[in-house]
Image (spheres, rainbow, N blue to C red):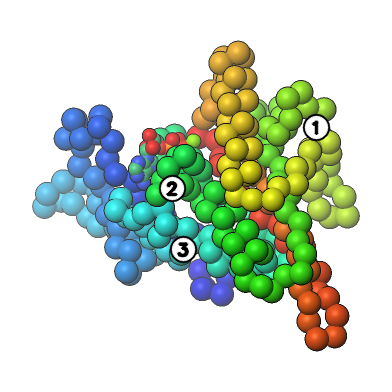
Amino acid sequence: MSSSSSVKVCVRLRPLNKREKRGNTMPVVTANTEKCEINVVKGLSTKATRHGFNFDSVFSEFSTQEEVFNQTLLPIVGQVMKGFEATVFAYGQTGTGKTYTMEGDITVDSQRGVIPRSCESIFDQLQNSGKFSDFNVSVSYLEIYNEELSDLLVEKGKNLRICEQRGKIHCMGLSETNVNSTEEIISIIQKAQERRQVAETKMNRASSRSHCLFTLRVISKEKVADGIIEREGKLHLVDLAG
Ligand code: ADP
Ligand code: MG
């Protein structure tokens, strides 16, 4: 894939968990972050074969949440601020670190994933760059469990429906909440997570079967010599099921 491609693929390896360490699990994949390459080892000792695969970025078990954000989301946030629409999602089987990468532990600064960090970066640019005369940020949070759609930002949601309008996919009935700071978004995400957990317990469902789409809409006004430029960008951050 060329580096100018509009689709970028990054890989992150997570550390071995306690169970894997106890079982003396040997990692079969190694990461070379500088070469943006991972190596997969198949077979044992003399019969072992190695296959290298290249990606746009590679993160090892030692990569921090901050490094992942800086190399993946930060440039995309820049594009969203310019008025583009972008989607980022984590893909992988259960327990590989998708939710850790997307959300992380939002209560601990160093453990925050790319969702809270993107919000922080957007508000920082809007409030502190001195470029914008006005702005409006709103969020929506949709959960898709099998075929069932739920609005994670409201207590009792309306019936939601996915439809296509002028070539664009919309979720009819999904609420949008205006937000003024990262802290406000964090508390909204926390409330949404609680709502999701209640639904999970009550209905005996598993989080590994639901997709969560968190969307930020950013409208900004920038004063230039001969008028005002108004931009609207969107960022979809998806924590996929699995
Ligand atoms: P998934 O969402 O893909 O099912 P999780 O994000 O829930 O996986 O990760 C599974 C477990 O591994 C969690 O306890 C998480 O905190 C931990 N984990 C995942 N990635 C990392 C990482 N890079 N560093 C430390 N712990 C991690
Ligand atoms: Mg998960």
Of label 3 and label 2, which has the lower sequence position?
3
Residues 162 and 222: in front is: 222
User: SS at mark 3?
Assistant: helix
Pinpoint residue 153: horizontal percent, then vertical percent.
Answer: 70, 34
Residue pointed to by mark 2 = 109
Three-letter amino acid code of the residue under disc 1: Leu
Inter-mark Cα distance, 3 to 1: 35 Å
Residue pointed to by mark 3 = 70
Three-letter amino acid code of the residue under disc 3: Asn
Pinpoint residue 202: horizontal percent, then vertical percent.
Answer: 60, 13
Of label 3 and label 1, which has the lower sequence position?
3
Pinpoint residue 199: horizontal percent, then vertical percent.
Answer: 62, 20
Q: Residues within 10 Å of mark 3 (few under 14, many from 20)?
A: some
Three-letter amino acid code of the residue under disc 2: Asp
Which is more foreground, mark 2 or mark 1?
2
Residue at the farthest right position? 166
Q: Is residue 98 visible?
A: no
Of label 2 and label 1, which has the lower sequence position?
2
**Which label sits on residue 160?**
1
Residues 111 and 54: in front is: 111
Residue at image x 81%, y 53%?
168
Q: Do tag 3 and tag 2 residues touch (Cβ < 8 Å)?
A: no
Q: Do tag 3 and tag 1 residues touch (Cβ < 8 Å)?
A: no
